[in-house]
């Protein structure tokens, strides 16, 4: 998700724009908010199509047909303006990665997830075909994975099944090589069975990581689609019975969506249909959307998208009365939107991670999700004995690995984000990263500079009387960084988890200043604390997340329905801490700690301010 470009219109139709989601061959997708507060994905079609009157006519017809599509597994079309200077369409915003992004992050889906995917896709095609549409471009980037199942998108620009007018020029193909049907590849007339062939190809890709016809080049892939048998060797047997019939070359031999659903039978209810890394992606994208929503809304009067052609006609008389500047402003707006789009294959509508490059494995956003107690494998350190790391520490950023069997009580620890990287110590290098080594007593610390944020460090510590403790620490850090760059195990993700959230985004500066006074700095503003943040003022405010299922002892308070414990501390500076459970789980629990430090007021005033801040931020936290 990217901010809007400077000078870019802030409104399209009646929708206030927040951010850019992605670009594709058909146009650009923007995150917007409707007047009633709903999130929408606004797709502006490629400006080149705006000059084709035939396209506008077909687009208008298909929008009207698409509005009849409903169902739990599609993103409904809400609004459109085929007559705008740049035609656009608004659909319900869906938060979740594309199928392609999910597989890139988590690898092939397990069989139960593929069956869940198959049921959702078949249900979506049932609705799309019911109103006389053929999707024509069912591919991995047009399937989004949400917390409660898949969503099929981009059917709003499909061609209605009527007449013989082509959406594109004669001889061109709508679809994606490797996922289109043989009849599409040969530019022959298609039926709804074409979408079922695409569904079969998607199931193979979901279960193996690659399509059944992938070749070394696009022409080779198209040849395979038309002439060769699908490669199902890596598909689990129970899934071959799903995908195989859909991939029949003869459309008449493919099952219908209803027949596929009958074969699947009732789906078992689940709150987590996908592997944990996919749910982590969903949670991360929701957090990024919330961050954009928390930004102050700009004045809509500052910038607005070009009006429809009908609206411009109604205002033609303004030029004769000396208001040519208004027309010039509209022309400038059109120029800003006339950029060419790439012909790649990104999601046409995705949430947070659609258009930007993949998240760097050492970035704070990724490190927040990593379980540090899984970074070191026992095999790599078997000569020292068996690590004991069964219990997660309260600090979610680090883990202690204990060994009492063979190596004099070795204690090893990994911290994935040291908040301030220090260059004091003996210089070293670990996995190509600058590192420093320091010893104190029986402990040796080696800290590598995080290349994504040079102020961050990734640290290993070995506490032992043996002379090779620094070598042990370096071995630990080497393994940890290699694991982080690969496919580290992530914390179990559940809907509404705070683990992916940058806690510096849960409170805005204006709100805090109204309670504690002027804010001078926001420490860890870029997430350097991973699971904590501090606002510095005459009264400092700290917020953090810990893994704890037991509340500390103190005074019970009610934060508008949320039970919390309040613990004032008396000293040179009054400190009042509030703690409450956001979520309690088996492997991880999430307790929020909010602390206000005050150097010149009494405990009642300090705790009153802590409660006011807590009541202000709780409604904006993800709902578990």
Image (spheres, rainbow, N blue to C red):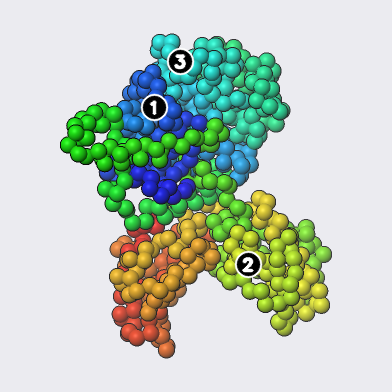
- Which residue occupies 50% across, 31% down? 25
Q: Nearer the viewer, mark 3 or mark 1?
A: 1
Examine the rendered structure and indicate whether residue 340 appears above or below residue 556. above
Q: Quadrant of the C terminus?
A: bottom left
> Quick one: 359 or 317, which is closer to the camera?
317
**Sequence-wise, which precedes: disc 3 or disc 1?**
1
> Quick one: 435 or 146, which is closer to the camera?
435
Q: Nearer the viewer, mark 3 or mark 2?
A: 3
**Sequence-wise, which precedes: disc 2 or disc 1?**
1
- Which residue occupies 72% across, 79% down? 439
Quarter where residue 231 is shown: top right
Examine the rendered structure and indicate whether residue 294 appears above or below residue 477. above
Q: Residue furthest bottom?
A: 572
Give the residue at mark 2.
Answer: 457
Q: Position of residue 320 (x, y in %)?
A: 19, 33
Give the residue at mark 1.
Answer: 50
Q: Is residue 506 visible?
A: yes
**Sequence-wise, which precedes: disc 3 or disc 2?**
3
Examine the rendered structure and indicate whether residue 245 appears above or below residue 100. above
Q: Residues within 10 Å of mark 2 (few under 14, many from 20)?
A: many
Q: Position of residue 380 (x, y in %)?
A: 78, 59
Give the residue at mark 3.
Answer: 166
Query: How far apart are the alpha carbons under marks 2 and 1?
Result: 51 Å
Q: Nearer the viewer, mark 2 or mark 1?
A: 1
Q: Residues within 10 Å of mark 1 (few under 14, many from 20)?
A: some
């Amino acid at each position: 998700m990217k901010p809007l470009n400077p000078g870019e219109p802030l409104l399209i139709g009646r929708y206030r724009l927040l951010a850019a989601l992605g670009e594709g061959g058909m146009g650009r997708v923007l995150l917007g908010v409707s007047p009633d507060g709903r999130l929408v994905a606004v797709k502006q079609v490629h400006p080149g199509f705006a000059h084709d009157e035939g396209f506008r006519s077909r687009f208008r017809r298909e929008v009207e047909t698409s509005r009849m599509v409903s169902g739990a597994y599609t993103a409904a079309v809400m609004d459109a303006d085929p007559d705008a200077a740049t035609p656009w369409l608004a659909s319900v915003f869906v938060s979740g990665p594309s199928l392609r992004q999910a597989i890139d992050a988590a690898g092939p889906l397990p069989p139960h997830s593929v069956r869940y995917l198959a049921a959702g896709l078949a249900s979506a095609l049932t609705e799309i075909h019911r109103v006389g549409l053929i999707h024509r471009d069912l591919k991995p980037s047009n399937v989004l994975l949400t917390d409660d199942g898949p969503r099929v998108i981009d059917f709003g620009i499909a061609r209605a099944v009527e007449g013989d007018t082509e959406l594109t020029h004669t001889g061109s193909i709508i679809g994606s090589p490797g996922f289109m049907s043989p009849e599409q590849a040969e530019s022959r007339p298609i039926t709804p069975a074409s979408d079922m062939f695409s569904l079969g190809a998607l199931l193979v890709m979901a279960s193996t990581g690659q399509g059944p016809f992938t070749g070394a080049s696009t022409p080779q892939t198209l040849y395979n689609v038309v002439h060769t048998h699908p490669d199902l060797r890596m598909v689990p047997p129970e899934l071959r019975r799903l995908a195989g019939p859909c991939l029949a070359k003869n459309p008449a031999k493919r099952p219908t969506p209803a027949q596929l659903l009958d074969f699947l039978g009732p789906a078992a209810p689940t709150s987590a249909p996908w592997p944990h890394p996919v749910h982590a992606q969903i949670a991360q994208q929701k957090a990024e959307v919330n961050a954009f929503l928390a930004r102050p809304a700009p004045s809509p009067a500052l910038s607005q998208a070009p009006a429809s052609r009908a609206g411009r006609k109604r205002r033609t008389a303004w030029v004769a009365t000396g208001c040519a500047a208004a027309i010039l402003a509209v022309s400038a707006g059109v120029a800003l939107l006339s950029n060419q789009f790439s012909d790649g294959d990104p999601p046409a509508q995705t949430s947070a991670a659609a258009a930007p490059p993949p998240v760097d494995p050492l970035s704070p956003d990724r490190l927040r999700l990593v379980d540090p107690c899984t970074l070191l494998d026992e095999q790599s350190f078997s000569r020292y004995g068996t690590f004991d790391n069964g219990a997660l520490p309260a600090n979610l950023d680090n883990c202690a690995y204990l060994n009492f069997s063979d190596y004099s009580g070795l204690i090893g620890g990994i911290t994935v984000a040291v908040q301030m990287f220090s260059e004091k110590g003996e210089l070293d290098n670990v996995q190509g990263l600058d590192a420093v080594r320091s010893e104190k007593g029986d402990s040796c610390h080696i800290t590598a500079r995080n290349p994504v944020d040079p102020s961050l460090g990734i640290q290993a510590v070995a506490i032992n009387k043996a002379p090779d403790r620094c070598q042990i620490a370096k071995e630990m850090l080497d393994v940890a960084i290699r694991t982080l760059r690969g496919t580290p195990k992530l914390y179990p993700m559940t809907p509404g988890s705070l683990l992916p959230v940058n806690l510096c985004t849960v409170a805005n500066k204006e709100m805090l200043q109204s309670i504690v006074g002027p804010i001078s700095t926001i420490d860890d503003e870029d997430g350097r604390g991973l699971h904590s943040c501090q606002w510095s003022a005459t009264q400092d405010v700290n917020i953090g997340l810990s893994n704890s299922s037991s509340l500390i002892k103190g005074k019970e308070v009610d934060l508008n329905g949320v039970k919390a414990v309040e613990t004032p501390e008396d000293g040179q500076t009054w400190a009042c801490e509030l703690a409450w459970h956001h979520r309690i789980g088996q492997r991880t629990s999430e307790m929020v700690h909010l602390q206000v430090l005050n150097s010149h007021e009494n405990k009642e005033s300090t705790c009153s301010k802590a409660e006011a801040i807590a009541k202000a931020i709780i409604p904006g936290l993800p709902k578990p």
